[in-house]
Each structure stands twice: as C-alpha cells, then as structure tokens.
Image (cartoon, grey):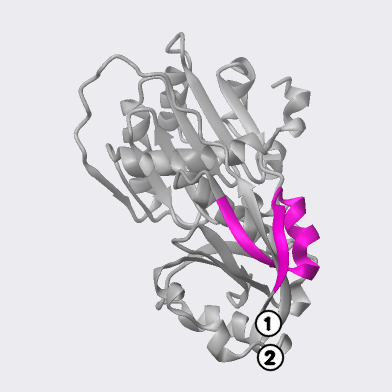
Amino acid sequence: MIAAGFHIVPAHWPTDAAALRGVRDAVFIREQQISAEDEWDDLDAVSRHVLALALDGNAIGCARLTPQRRIGRMAVLAEWRGRGVGMALLTHLTAEARALGWPEVQLSAQQHAIDFYARAGFIAYGDTYLDANIPHRMMRLALEPFAVPAPRALQPAPPAEPLQADNLATLAAAMLRLLHDARHGITLYTRDLDPGLLDQAPILEALRTLAVRGRGAQLRLLVQQPDAALRDGHLMLPLIQRLPSVIQLRQPVEDADLHYPSAFLLNDRGGYLLRALASRHEAMGNTFAPGRAAQLTAYFDQVWARSQPLRELQPLQL
C-alpha cells in the first residue's frame, strides 16, 4: 500500500522551472540562507530534473542530475521531511544514472546529510570543505551495469509502427498487438493488474498462448497494488496459478517504485506501450523502438531486483 501521499515525476527546465524554483527557494535561500547567486547556475538548463508532487499537484521536493554525473540540488520542504520523499528522489536519479550506463554517480553532501546518503549506499571521500559557508563532503555510489543478454540468432526486425490509445478499446488493441508480436516473453509494470483491461478475454487468451509457447517463455509482472485483484478475484489469477514458473509476479516495496505514476508493457521484439498515468487509458508506443524499449527494460530490471515476491498470492501457491 502507498502510505505517503506523493509521487515522483520527471521535470524539464524551463517548463517546470517555477515548481523547481519554488522548492529550492524555500529550502536553500530562505531556510538555509544561501544566496541566490550561489543557488542558480547554468547547469539547470542542461540537467535532468525530478519533482516530488503531493496528491494536490503541489511540488514538495526536487533534485537534479547534471552532465558531470552528479546528483545535486536535493531539496524537500520541511513539513514533508521524514516521509520518504528524499529517498524516493535519490532512488529515481540513481536509477536514471544507471540506465544511462554511468559507472558511478557523485554528490556533494551537506555534513548533516551524510548518514542519509550512506543509507542509500553512497561512500564519503576526501576532506570536509565549505560550500556557501556550509560544511560538505563528496560522496560517490558505484553503479553496477545491467546484465547484457546473450546474443540470439539474427531475426528480421518487425516493422516500426506507432501505437496510440486514447480510450479503453484502443488501449486493448495496442496491447494485443504487442502480445501477438512477442516471441517468448513480455514485461509489464502495472498498478493493480488493470481490471477491465487485462481481464478481457482476447488479452487473457494472448497471455495464455504466450505463456504455453514452450521453452524460454517468461512473463514478468510488477504489481504495485495487488489487494484489489486478490479481493475481486481477477480473471488472470487462475492463469498465474497454473503457470507459476512462467508467469512471475513481484511487488515493489520502496516508496519511489510504489509511487511510480506510469504503466508500461514491453515485448521481447523491441515493442513498447507506455501510459504516462497508469490510471488513464491514454498511451503511446511503437511496435519496434529498441532504444526506448531498452530504457524501460533497464528501469524495470532495477525495480524488479529490489522488489519482493507477492506473498499475498501464497494462498494460491503462486
């Protein structure tokens, strides 16, 4: 269950500059008395930013990842501290750095925050120094590269065709296209097994056909909120029960993963379908976009590694 009322979203400069400035002005300039000249720099325009948003849409935290491979400008409003916001921001940016293939990421930690970053695996090095009259130390985190799959025999690439959905019917049709194109497997990041979508008969049949295809078949599902599916007897559960070695489910446990706002489906032929908001039917994708599919797969793999098997499904012996 999601306990804290916030989620993490990518942000862009200057589109989201007002929200980013609002948080940093409150934390760094007004609270910590850092001068505006020290706070704002040219790196904002070329960095990757993230925002933590409360359920009402107001910005409550932010951070950035610079081209120098540093995490910085990590800020959380005072009333939201101690609720996992900072760790969610940090987890998101370290995952992004790993997806970019960086061997490590660094940050300049204020002295009082060193223990916080150490809990995320960062290691301090070098001497203490002053930055804006505040004691800091450098810290670094080594990033393990994603495993490179063994090369397969060359197969003709499928045609690259855009996928788009704006309602339940077109979303189901796009999903079916990716399922029918799959060779042996799919990867699915879902909020709650999408009742009304994943329990449609054509989709269930496509999943069943893929799951019984034979050696090498694998369906991996990350489910943020399984309670409703269990309570309501989701029609996919009997299929999962019959094929537990092929259809594998895990539930995220970290705040950043539980608050990931999107949902996506990937197949093993470079196709993807992404819903920016898992609660809506609007989606964009392509039948063959290996770069984007690899990026989403990298994120999925990292979340999968730190998630846990769905213990609520043990009564079904899954």
Q: Which residues are magenta?
A: 105-129
Q: Is residue 302 above or below residue 311?
A: below
Q: Is residue 5 above or below residue 124?
A: below
Q: Which residue is mark 1?
A: 27
Instruction: Look at 39% across and 31% down and name the residue there.
Output: 267
How many residues crowd mark 1 within 10 Å: few (<14), some (14–19), many (20+)?
many
How many residues crowd mark 2 within 10 Å: few (<14), some (14–19), many (20+)?
few
Q: Position of residue 219 (x, y in %)?
A: 51, 25
Task: State yes or no: residue 95 in magenta.
Answer: no
Q: Which residue is mark 2?
A: 30
> From the viewer's perspective, is 119 left or right of 71?
right
Q: Position of residue 30 (x, y in %)?
A: 68, 90
Q: Amino acid at mark 2?
A: Arg
> From the viewer's perspective, is 64 left or right of 206?
right
The secondary element bearing badge 2 is classed as: helix
| Mark 2 touches mark 1? (CB < 8 Å) | yes
Q: Position of residue 197 (x, y in %)?
A: 47, 42
Q: Is residue 296 above or below residue 125?
A: above
Instruction: Look at 54% across and 60% down and name the residue there.
Output: 70
Quick check: can you spot residue 157? yes
Quick check: can you spot residue 260? no
Q: Position of residue 159 (x, y in %)?
A: 19, 34
Of residues 280 and 127, the one drawn nearer to the viewer in this rendering: 127
> From the viewer's perspective, is 216 left or right of 316?
left
- Quarter assignment of residue 81: bottom right
Of residues 98 and 108, the one drawn nearer to the viewer in this rendering: 108
- Quarter assignment of residue 107: bottom right
